[in-house]
């Protein structure tokens, strides 16, 4: 038995199997969560290269699987990444029923997790571009709404498809590194192609338009899931490429490109969030700010050799980002109510249509604003501890980078205050009441409590992510 068989093939086959039970929603949610948690727990146990003993049986877990002439390699050092992927998937599966996610969400979610694991494991890496395109294709039926036009979904699919050839061409150029050192011209070309590829895949300015459109049109919970898993795995994939081809890191232009792209993403996202009149699109702009912050951190980490702490903080952003997006998306679904299944869902979350809803759904409204505050880095919430250290580290490298990130957070915070004002605005005689469903109340309160606990006691959760810097050696060059 080998690791790729366990963490790639097994969830893929189980995802296909669950397609036949997709109408039994509670059953497939429990099965999907169970499979994801088992795979995360097995990765935490990390038997790769050591084997497993079951009574009289001793099973050795090897690290390589060969399929159609390509190698998929998952070694013991990849175990923390597997834990993040499958634990994150289990977290999103937990709210699927309450969020009224598509009946294909659990089967497709397992398939997406398997494909994204394969993205990190396939050798040579240029085949990862084809797997990323497959992920986009699997996401498409989840994001499409039968009653909507789906312009954002089509743009998402188009940009993901446009990013694929740039990654393929990068792999083609870098394949020559196994035969001999690359020339400066080849490194320049590879760096530019890689930057364009990731600009399309991650929605980096000016190719970001699909992010707010998707957040506006699709089920907010599914859109947030896609934002989270894609950004997580593509970030790890990009770090893996930089680790493998150190010549790209030594190309000084990469620092300037990352700093410029990150600053533009953070400032643009903050400005649009501050003046936004649609809370769904506000989630999209929050994702843009998060992407910009990640680019700024990566640029600063690569520019300062041996600065492992910044790279650790990049990984530490995973927990508050995933929790903030998940809680916010669940609150948006609750506030949208029955409009989620109507043709004009796009209009349901505009300010004029949610005005005063905080009086009828105070828990959903309060948790929504709390999640936005956390994503903006408000003190005492999950997003604050990591951002505080990041801002300090960025300021030590470039005051402009730190200012851009801080301005983005201020813009999102301003948008959250405007949303709060609209939600509680209404006639004085309009009574306050709690009309959310009991299941929604339970999950929203649990999510809000988690945001507070992680913000107040970050030392309980974040060091595990910071310690994952030993996955990458690019800073010790």
Image: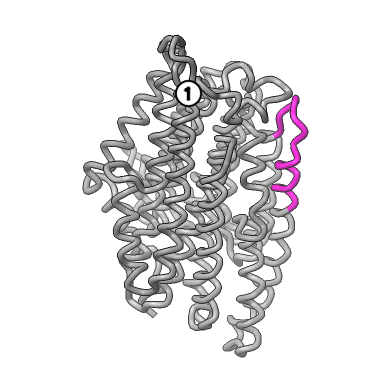
Which residue is drawn at the image coordinates 34% and 61% (left, top)? 390
Q: Is residue 209 above or below residue 215?
A: below
Q: In the drawing, does residue 155 fall left or right of residue 447? A: right
Residue at figure coordinates x 65%, y 41% from the top left: 214
Residue 155 located within the stretch drawn in magenta = yes
Q: How many marks?
A: 1
User: Can residue 171 be seen here?
Assistant: no
From the image, which quarter does the C terminus lie in? bottom left
What percent of the width, then of the height, locates residue 258?
52, 69
Q: Residue 445's quadrant in the figure?
A: top left
* Classed neighbour count for the residue bearing mark 1: other residues with Cα under 10 Å, few (<14), some (14–19), many (≥20): some
In magenta, the rendered stretch is 144-158
Please identify the quarter of the rendering in which residue 264 is found: bottom right
Query: Magenta segment: does it hold 117?
Result: no
Residue beneath the point at 71% across and 25% down? 344
Q: Is residue 352 visible?
A: yes
Q: Position of residue 235 (x, y in %)?
A: 50, 58
In the image: residue 467, left or right of residue 67: left
Secondary structure of residue under mark 1: loop
Instruction: Indicate the position of residue 273 as horizontal and vertical percent values.
Output: 53, 46
Q: What residue is shown with label 1?
A: 425
Q: Looking at this view, is 164 or 261 the one in front?
A: 261
Residue located at (60% from left, 27% from top): 352
177 and 101: which is toward the camera:
101
């Amino acid at each position: 038995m080998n690791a790729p068989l366990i963490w790639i093939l097994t969830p893929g086959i189980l995802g296909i199997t669950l397609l036949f039970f997709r109408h039994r929603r509670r059953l497939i949610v429990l099965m999907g969560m169970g499979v994801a948690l088992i795979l995360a727990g097995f990765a935490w146990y990390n038997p790769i290269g050591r084997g497993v003993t079951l009574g009289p049986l001793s099973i050795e877990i090897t690290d390589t699987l060969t399929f159609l002439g390509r190698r998929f390699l998952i070694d013991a050092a990849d175990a923390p990444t597997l834990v993040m992927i499958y634990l994150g998937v289990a977290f999103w599966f937990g709210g699927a029923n309450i969020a009224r996610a598509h009946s294909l969400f659990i089967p497709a979610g397992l398939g997406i997790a398997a494909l994204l694991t394969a993205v990190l494991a396939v050798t040579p890496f240029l085949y990862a571009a084809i797997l990323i395109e497959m992920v986009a294709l699997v996401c498409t039926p989840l994001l499409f709404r039968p009653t909507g036009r789906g312009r954002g979904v089509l743009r998402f699919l188009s940009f993901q498809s446009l990013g694929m050839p740039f990654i393929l061409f990068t792999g083609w150029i870098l394949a020559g590194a196994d035969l001999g050192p690359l020339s400066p011209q080849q490194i320049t070309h590879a760096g530019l192609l890689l930057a364009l590829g990731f600009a399309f895949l991650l929605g980096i300015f000016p190719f970001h338009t699909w992010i707010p459109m998707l957040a506006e049109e699709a089920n907010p919970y599914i859109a947030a899931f896609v934002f989270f898993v894609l950004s997580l795995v593509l970030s790890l994939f990009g770090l893996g490429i930089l680790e493998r081809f150190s010549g790209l890191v030594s190309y000084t232009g990469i620092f300037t490109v990352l700093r410029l792209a990150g600053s533009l993403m953070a400032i643009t996202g903050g400005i649009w969030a501050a003046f936004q009149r649609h809370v769904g699109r506000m989630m999209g702009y929050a994702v843009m700010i998060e992407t910009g912050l990640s680019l700024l951190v990566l640029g600063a980490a690569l520019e300062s050799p041996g600065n492992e702490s910044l790279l650790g903080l990049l990984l530490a952003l995973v927990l508050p980002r995933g929790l903030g997006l998940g809680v916010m998306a669940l609150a948006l679904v609750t506030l949208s109510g029955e409009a989620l299944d109507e043709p004009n869902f796009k209009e349901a979350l505009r300010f004029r249509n949610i005005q005063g809803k905080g009086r009828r759904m105070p828990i959903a409204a309060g948790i929504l604003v709390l999640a936005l505050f956390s994503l903006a880095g408000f003190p005492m919430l999950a997003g604050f501890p990591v951002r505080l250290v990041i801002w300090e580290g960025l300021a030590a490298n470039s005051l402009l980078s730190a200012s851009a990130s801080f301005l983005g957070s201020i813009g999102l915070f301003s948008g959250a205050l405007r949303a709060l004002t609209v939600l509680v605005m209404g006639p004085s005689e309009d009574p306050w009441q709690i009309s959310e469903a009991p299941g929604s109340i339970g999950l929203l309160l649990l999510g809000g409590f988690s945001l507070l606990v992680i913000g107040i006691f970050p030392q309980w959760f974040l060091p595990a992510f910071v310690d994952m810097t030993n996955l990458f050696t690019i800073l010790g060059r």
